Amino acid sequence: MLKRIAVLTSGGDSPGMNAAIRAAVRTAIYNKIDVYGIKRGYAGLLEKDFVPLDLGSVGGILQRGGTILETARSEKFKTEEGLQLAVNNLREEKIDGLVVIGGDGSFRGALALFERGVPVVGVPATIDNDIGGTHFTIGFDTAVNTVIEALDKLRDTASSHERMFIVEVMGRESGWIALTAGLACGAESILIPEIGYDIEEILVRLRRGRNRGKTHSLIVVAEGVASASEIKDQIWDAGGFEMRVVVLGHIQRGGSPTAFDRMLASRLGAGAVDLLLNGEVGKMVGWENERVVSHTLEYSWKHKHTIDKELYTLAGVLSI
Ligand code: F6P
């Protein structure tokens, strides 16, 4: 019988992590399970930085960005010595279930713990939306909305000054943020790692716009492709236009989660505790076809959630 579980957040923070913590804690308490929070992810696990969580400790956090448990990236945890220490610390605290909220790297860490006997489940939370086994990761929708707000503002100034902007967005090796926000804002070109790019084609699109009287343009580039300033130089060197560069950076990781992310985080946080209760460990929860689903942790990287090519084609058609 499950008596005491622990929750941690790991890797890059994402909006909705707090809502997921709240859902996991409250679902556990509802099922008469004690809950501990582990501060600063795997780093805190090695330092035994455990805090008891009750109903009140997760009150008022649903709407807050970031993570109240804080997060970190720990190199020591990746060593055999670190992993053994983590397992021992969990045993000493009598933790019989661990919920890991995070992205790809966090899930790999979770699998390493599972292989050493820890009953663990993963909750996919990253703005990158690149985890297999779920159609959406917690934080992606909020990040896209943050980017959209910035792109709309840049469009205002671009059209007022007849300017062209290249906007660099996050996503690591994934083009999901660039593609979704670019489509939603009518970006003239969207550069994503999954497809690659051709400077000549970008120039053709820019010139075509100019020829029909369009005086402003937005190019969205995913960081996994190149930096915005590299693209700017390439366009200039190819005999193109003068462009201005904006790098949105970490503002994409902050802010209050959208309604969608709050719903997703609540479902997945609760779903994770349900998995522990059912003894379905070494797994992750996901959201597919309007349902909470589960997959093995390995599934999340063996079946990477890659961009929808039809969406990319559509963005190209609509921004002709
Ligand atoms: O994985 C989330 C993410 O924000 C990526 O999109 C980005 O490449 C990376 O983290 C940035 O990491 P850091 O905050 O360590 O610079």
Image (spheres, rainbow, N blue to C red):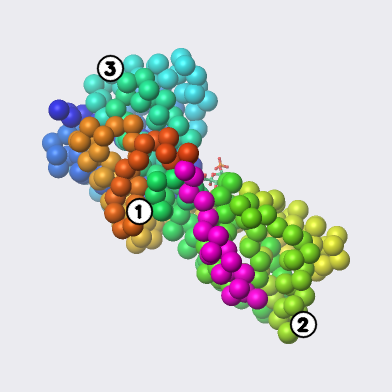
Residue 143 placed where, x, y %? 48, 57
Q: Count up the numbered dots.
A: 3
- Using the image, determine if residue 62 lies above or below residue 95: below
Q: What's the residue type where badge 2 is placed?
A: Asn
Which image quarter is the N terminus in? top left
113 inside magenta stretch: no
Q: Is residue 187 left or right of residue 298?
A: right
Comes first in the chain, label 1 or label 2: 2
| CA separation in Å, label 2 and label 3 | 71 Å
| CA separation in Å, label 1 and label 2 | 44 Å
Name the residue at 80% across, 57% down. 233
Q: Which mark is residue 91?
A: none
Q: Is residue 54 left or right of residue 189?
A: left
Q: Is residue 69 left or right of residue 143?
A: left
Q: What's the residue type where badge 1 is placed?
A: Glu
Relative depth, front residue between 311 and 11: 311
Q: Which residue is mark 1?
A: 288
- What's drawn in magenta, residue-wise? 303-320
Label 1 with label 2: CB-CB less than 8 Å: no
Q: Is residue 139 visible?
A: yes
Task: Answer few, some or many: residues within 10 Å of disc 3's Cα (few below 14, many 20 plus, some between 14 and 19).
Answer: few
Name the residue at 86% across, 66% down. 239
Q: Is residue 35 visible?
A: no
Name the residue at 52% across, 69% down. 184
Name the residue at 74% across, 77% down. 208
Instruction: Describe the element under mark 1 as helix, strand or loop.
Output: strand
Q: Which mark is residue 211?
A: 2
| CA separation in Å, label 1 and label 3 | 37 Å
Q: Which residue is mark 3?
A: 92
Label 2 with label 3: CB-CB less than 8 Å: no
